[in-house]
Image: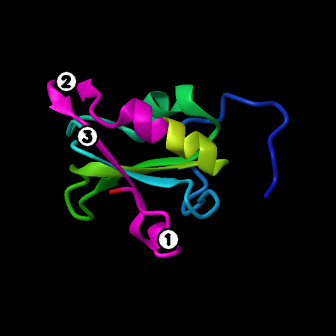
Amino acid sequence: ATRDPGGGGGSGSGGSSGKRGPRGANLAVFCIPNAYTDVELHEIARPYGNVVYAQVSRHRDSGLSRGYGFVSFETVEEAEKAIGGIHGMVVQGRALRVEKVKADEESGGSRR
């Protein structure tokens, strides 16, 4: 895992497709407003840690949002902090729901 010593910024729309954090640091965010972009999803997650990936899932044909997206953090601790901070956050009248990515949960530690 390489670390960007410069910290923030980035070019915005997540050009590094498929980049993920370590096991347990990858989150699925549900009930995202339909107009939300990757950049806006990144902005919601950024206060909780170093976001290495943020992408809103879109329909292949129409390009419209599917209403959920994925956020990956550099560490599991940052992801845990984000779950606590983002889960239940109301954005444009919709309460966001956050879960660890299912593939990451197979190694135990699922929160119920």
What SS does tag 3 mark?
loop
The quadrant of the image that shows the N terminus is: bottom right
Mark 3 or 1: the one toward you? 1
Cα–Cα span, label 1 and label 2: 34 Å
**Mark 2 or mark 3, which has the lower sequence index?**
3
**Mark 3 or mark 1, which has the lower sequence index?**
3
Residue 90 sits in which quadrant? top left
Side of 82 where 50 appears, left or right: right
Please tell me whether residue 23 is drawn above or below residue 103 in the rendered image.
above
Measuring from the top left, give residue 40's x and y in whole percent.
40, 31
- The residue where tag 1 is placed is 108
Side of 55 where 64 appears, left or right: left
The residue located at (52%, 36%) in the rendering is 81
Q: Give the range drawn in magenta.
A: 82-111
Please tell me whether residue 67 is drawn above or below residue 24 in the rendered image.
above
Q: Is the residue marked by circle 2 packed among few (<14), some (14-19), or many (20+) residues within 10 Å?
A: few
Tag 1: amino acid:
Gly
- The residue where tag 3 is placed is 32
- The residue where tag 2 is placed is 92
